[in-house]
Image (spheres, grey):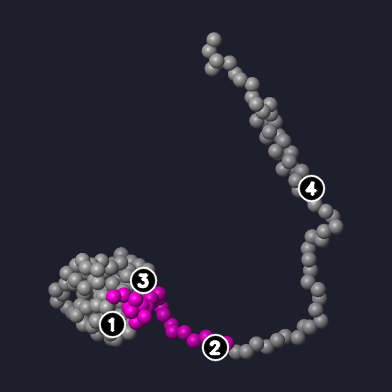
Amino acid sequence: MNNRSIPRASRFPITGLALLVSLNSLCLISPFIQADDDVPTSVTAPASDDTAAVTLGTVSVIGQGETRQVQRVTQKDVSAYSAGTSPLKVLQRLPGVNFQSGDPLGREEGSQRISLRGFDMHHLGYTLDGVTLGNMSFGNFNGLSITRAIIAENIAASEVAPGIGSLGTASNSDLGGTIQFTS
């Protein structure tokens, strides 16, 4: 005889239907089960006789209006890198900025590639103290690379603004954003 054709007795005699009925009945009676009637259900704060208002000091909030997200890299951030590092390589620590170069310091102009949220270096606007730098490509005809204009240690701050460049940016290629260097 084949042992596979004979059904074996279950180790647990409760069938699936009986288990389902017992779980349903437990769910139905659970709202009626309470712990102890002596425990208060809500706690109220004691009434206070002090109803006088307290006047606080004046708070002044001072800020600079920005119409979009602007990220800044300061001289302190630049000092974390090795001396002679490209200013563009320092920007790679910002979100949305991708920088690639053939050397570890990012100085090789022929292999430099920077993109800002998917826009490559030809669609970004670059300025140094408000003066346009062109499109920063190798052998460009309309400006100057930032590595030729100033060394990274002399840059006080760099600002990266994704999205279409503002009207105040002196650039004709700022469709993907602007990178502004300040000495």
In the rendered view, tell whether residue 178 sits above or below residue 12.
Answer: below
Which residue is at a point 81% across and 81% down the rendered structure image?
Answer: 49
Q: Secondary structure at mark 4?
A: loop
The quadrant in which residue 68 appears is: bottom left
Q: Residue, x 19% and y 80% (percent of image)?
A: 148
Q: Which residue is mark 1?
A: 153
Label 1 close to label 4 by CB (< 8 Å): no
Query: Going by the image, does 150 lie left or right of 141?
Result: right
- Mark 1 and mark 3 residues within 8 Å of each other at the beta carbon: no
Circle 4 packing at 10 Å, graded few (<14), some (14-19), many (20+), is few
N-terminal of the two: label 2 or label 3?
A: 2
Q: Residues within 10 Å of mark 3 (few under 14, many from 20)?
A: few
Mark 2 highlights which residue? 60
Mark closer to the chain start, 1 or 3: 3
Q: Which residues are magenta?
A: 59-82
Question: Marks 2/4: CA distance?
Answer: 55 Å
Mark 2 → mark 3, Cα distance in angstroms: 30 Å
Mark in front: 1 vs 4: 1
Q: CA distance from mark 1 to mark 4?
A: 73 Å
Question: Label 3 belongs to which residue?
Answer: 94
Instruction: Spot the residue most to the bottom.
Output: 58
| Residue extending furthest toward the front | 82
* Residue underneath mark 4: 33
Query: Under tag 1, what secondary structure?
Result: helix
